[in-house]
Amino acid sequence: MIIIYELLILIIMSISYKCPQCGKNIITECEVSNIKCPYCGNDFQAINGQEPPVFRHANQQQQQPPYGQQGAYQQPPYGGQQGAYQQPYMQPNDIFANGPSGKSRGIAGLLAILVGAFGVHYFYLGKTTAGVVFLIASILSCFVLAAVTGIIALIQGIMMLCMSQQEFEDKYVNPAVSFPIF
């Protein structure tokens, strides 16, 4: 029983050094300064800080060396190796790109912000009824209602510039309503 206990203590307290030439682990019973590798025959010194000991338990195969040591895991360069993280490709959100209907939300938004009081953005979108209502309201009121239609058009222009192309198509280009306000 005592022999088994002593063998377990020796296994638990054994110290493992790594040969700098062949990279194999050499297990010793105690800390030593000069080590001869039984695999390649290389003599090397185990200096504190240079080759730190790796403690092993009886059921462990091999412990990973500390970060930065030879054999430690190194993160692969970004995009350089297979398995490295890559962000999915997303198409650029170009505001002035024409959508499926051929209308650009950037142009419609700028028209709404700059000359929206006269309904020009509605004429661009093909909503002539809404464009005529804005134009007549601004002209017949001697430009008094132009402030109101201008504020409505300013809000619409900002909304057009902030929404996605699909939302723009659904809300301003393709609806059955001939007077899309908000």
Image (cartoon, rainbow, N blue to C red):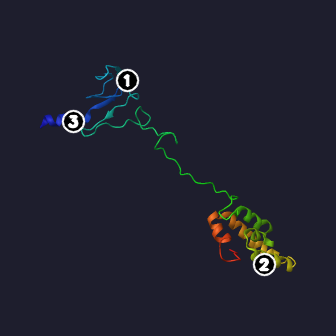
The relative height of residue 64 versus residue 163 in the rendered view (above or below) is above
**Callout 3 amino acid:** Ile
Q: Which of 97 and 113 is in front in this view?
A: 97
The relative height of residue 74 versus residue 169 in the rendered view (above or below) is above
Residue 117 in the image: x percent, y percent? 80, 72
Label 2 to label 1, Cα distance in Å?
A: 87 Å
Kindly tell me whether residue 65 is visible in this rendering. Answer: yes
What mark, if any, has residue 54 been given in the picture? none
Label 1 to label 3, Cα distance in Å?
A: 30 Å
- Left or right: 163 with respect to 24? right
Kindly tell me whether residue 164 is visible in this rendering. Answer: no
Q: Mark 3 points at which residue?
A: 9
Q: Mark 1 or mark 2, which is nearer the start of the sequence?
A: 1
Q: Name the residue under label 1.
A: 21
Q: Mark 3 or mark 1, which is nearer the start of the sequence?
A: 3
Q: Residue at x 14, y 34 (%)?
A: 3
**Callout 1 amino acid:** Gln
Residue 118 in the image: x percent, y percent? 81, 72
Q: Mark 2 points at which residue?
A: 133
Q: Residue at x 79, y 65 (%)?
A: 114
Q: Mark 2 or mark 3, which is nearer the start of the sequence?
A: 3
